[in-house]
Amino acid sequence: MASRSESKPNSQAPSVFASEIEGFTSASRLSRRESDIVMALIRNVTNSEEIANALGISTHTVNNHLKSIFEKTSTKSKTEILSSFLRFAADRLQNRSMFVRKPRVLVIDDEAMITEFIAGGLGERGIKAYTLTDPTQALEQIAKYNIDFVVCDVRMPAMNGLDVLKTVRQQYPVWPYFVFVTGYPDYSMEEVMHYGAAGFIEKPLDLDKLFRHIMGHLVESTEEREELLQVRAAGAVQLDEVLELQEGELGFGGAFIPMEPNTQKRTRLNVGSVVELNLAPTKWSHTLKVKGQVVWRRNVKNGNLRPGLGIRFINMSDKDQDLFADYIRSREIKSFIPLGIGSETDVAG
């Protein structure tokens, strides 16, 4: 039987930055066990006792390895180790020519200190970020800087985040993407995605999670997008039947799939599941072959909201993507993932 010090590290995929982790640990000349500890930190396992339990070693051994990691990486804390790694990863991603240009992000919050914190963190990860404390100027800034992604607070005195999103969607139905950052459960995931957001991230803010969220929507390469979103194609659930969807069940970033609770249970489609679909929008002769991910599910009828799944599109063929973009534009659909309201046209007004 292997001793505690010889037990195998957790084999779970450590991060979307697998190759960057390997490069960082190699450049820092970390031992195998030191590399395991860095991986644990990246997984957000920061307590020494928890790291010890995960790796099958003593807390004393973990702390000794941490001292060695501090010396080799010229850092003084676990937080500094993560910051050092993320700067390394951002440089590697840029060197891989992941983007033709840096993605441009507009950070909106009525507190300047928060906007600077988020912008600084994104800048360290290779993203160009602009800040704005007056949400009424959002349209002007989006046009001025050709913004790709908006990171927006929900509760602001001059204009709340949802109103900012609705105003932007009146002029820009599809672009830029939106993500809300909030510490208050004012809206559900279904609601923010319905109104045209790509989702929301709860406070306290995890900058690495925000970075992955942004990159996952902006990366064009299918392989890189699936890696960033931590999607495993091999585990995808295939639904062979052609699903006929109403206009109100399609958004520019995903679809509402009506599905009864028994069917949901039988197909084992839970939040996080990857699914391959054949979608046939109503009054359209073309069938879309889509890979998506379940981001929310409703297994009971709630008022005029039907049971079903909120599917975020991960990828489709270039041809399908062009055809679908024309379909969305011609119908002025502004929702990201529709809520599934009866048979009404499901768009944000």
Image: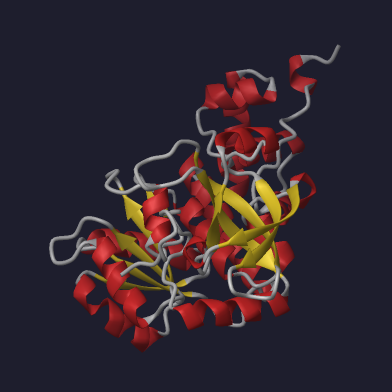
Where is residue 22? Give x, y as percent: 73, 51
Q: Position of residue 188 (x, y in %)?
A: 36, 47
The colour scheme used to paint the residues is secondary structure
- State the quadrant of the C terminus: bottom left
The reply to whether residue 71 is in sight is yes
20 or 14, nearer to the observer? 14
Q: Residue at x 79, y 14 (%)?
A: 3
Q: Quadrant of the N terminus?
A: top right
Residue 59 percent location from the top left of the image:
58, 20
**Which of the two residues, 196 or 250, is positioned nearer the viewer here?**
250
The picture quadrant where one finds residue 269 is top right
Whether residue 205 is visible here, answered yes or no, is no
Q: Among all residues in the image, which is located at the extreme right?
A: 1
The image shows residue 152 at horizontal and vertical percentages of 32, 63
Tell which residue pokes out farthest to the left in this image: 157
Left or right, 311 with respect to 160, comes to right
Q: Residue at x 41, y 59 (%)?
A: 194
Is 204 on the left-hand or right-hand side of 110?
right
- In the displayed structure, 33 sits above or below 50; it is below
336 or 3, nearer to the observer: 336
Q: Residue at x 55, y 61 (%)?
A: 254
Outermost residue, top side: 1
Q: Is residue 61 left or right of residue 236?
A: left
Quadrant of res 60: top right
Residue at 30 percent of width and 43 percent of height: 185
**Tag count:** 0
